[in-house]
Image: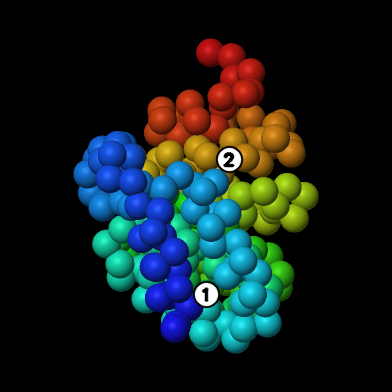
């Protein structure tokens, strides 16, 4: 039995139709659900995830791709959990495949989780891999651009500040809610490490950035009037 088939069988056994309806409604009825809360899903799949240590990255990505094609959203979440648990087996050659997943059945929940996986891969060899994000931030697909904007979440002192601020300005003209929100989130995350740098950036570019971005980025900053 393939990895994906094992995951699908495990999840199907935990299905809760009533919970599935509530979860689907929360996601604006864009996706079907099994109705499995995240802690229960991860607990059920933990033995399988652990057993995959050392499995070839290509095999993991193949399983993720198969799971991504399933209608139930938990299958995509499980695919991300698999990739995140074995992210050290991924390298720069796998970034395109990860970005391709982000463009399928795309919505903020899966895209943002994949952004963390992409960011971990990039951070492992930033000097060689971050130029891939410079390409991604210019991609026609908005979700790929969102991944680029968010890929440095949690990097703190390792954050490439020129890229963070540069991406924010590159995307500032966009009217899409999810892009504007991502810019604010990326800046707010870095503000936990260096609030003065973010405050200065927001004040200098307040006229360029959207009100939503400034509000998100400045949530914990004293921006004055």
Residue 214, given in percent of the width and then of the height, sits at 49, 30
**Within-10-Å neighbours for mark 1: few <14, some 14–19, many 20+:** some
Q: Is residue 83 above or below residue 54?
A: above
Q: Residue at x 63, y 18 (%)?
A: 222
Residue 14 in view of the camera: yes
Q: Quadrant of residue 201?
A: top right
Q: Nearer the viewer, residue 45 or 217?
A: 45
**Within-10-Å neighbours for mark 2: few <14, some 14–19, many 20+:** many
Foreground mark, 2 or 1, reads 1
Callouts 2 and 1 close, C-beta under 8 Å: no
Q: Helix, strand, or loop for circle 1?
A: helix
As drawn, the residue found furthest toward the left would be 29
Residue 209, given in percent of the width and then of the height, sits at 44, 36
Between the C-alphas of marks 2 and 1, the distance is 23 Å
Q: Which residue is mark 1?
A: 95
Q: Nearer the viewer, residue 20 or 151?
A: 20
Q: Helix, strand, or loop for circle 2?
A: helix
Question: Which mark is drawn over residue 31?
Answer: none
Residue 142 in view of the camera: no
Who comes first in sequence, dot 2 or dot 1?
1
Residue 12, given in percent of the width and then of the height, sits at 36, 60
Q: Is residue 110 left or right of residue 128?
A: left
Q: Could you tell me which quadrant the N terminus lies in?
A: bottom left
Q: Is residue 42 above or below residue 62?
A: above
Q: Is residue 134 left or right of residue 100?
A: right
Q: Quadrant of residue 49?
A: bottom right
Q: Residue at x 65, y 69 (%)?
A: 50
Q: Residue at x 54, y 62 (%)?
A: 45
Residue 180, given in percent of the width and then of the height, sits at 40, 41
Q: Which residue is mark 2?
A: 187
Q: Residue at x 71, y 31 (%)?
A: 196
As drawn, the residue found furthest toward the front would be 13
């Amino acid at each position: 039995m393939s990895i994906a088939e094992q995951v699908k069988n495990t999840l199907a056994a935990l299905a809760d139709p009533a919970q599935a309806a509530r979860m689907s409604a929360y996601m604006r009825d864009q996706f079907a659900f099994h109705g499995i809360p995240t802690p229960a899903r991860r607990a059920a799949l933990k033995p399988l995830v652990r057993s995959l240590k050392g499995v070839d990255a290509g095999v993991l990505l193949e399983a993720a791709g198969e799971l991504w094609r399933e209608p139930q959203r938990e299958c995509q979440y499980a695919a991300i959990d698999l990739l995140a648990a074995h992210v050290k087996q991924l390298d720069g050659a796998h970034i395109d495949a990860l970005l391709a997943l982000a463009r399928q059945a795309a919505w903020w929940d899966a895209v943002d989780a994949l952004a963390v996986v992409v960011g971990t891969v990039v951070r492992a060899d930033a000097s060689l891999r971050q130029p891939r994000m410079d390409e991604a931030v210019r991609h026609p697909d908005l979700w790929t651009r969102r991944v680029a904007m968010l890929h440095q979440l949690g990097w703190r002192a390792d954050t490439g500040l020129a890229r963070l601020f540069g991406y924010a300005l590159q995307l500032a003209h966009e009217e899409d809610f999810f892009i504007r929100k991502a810019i604010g989130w990326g800046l707010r995350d870095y503000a936990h490490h260096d609030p003065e740098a973010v405050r200065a950036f927001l004040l200098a570019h307040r006229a360029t950035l959207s009100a939503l971005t400034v509000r998100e980025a400045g949530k914990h900053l004293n921006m004055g009037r």
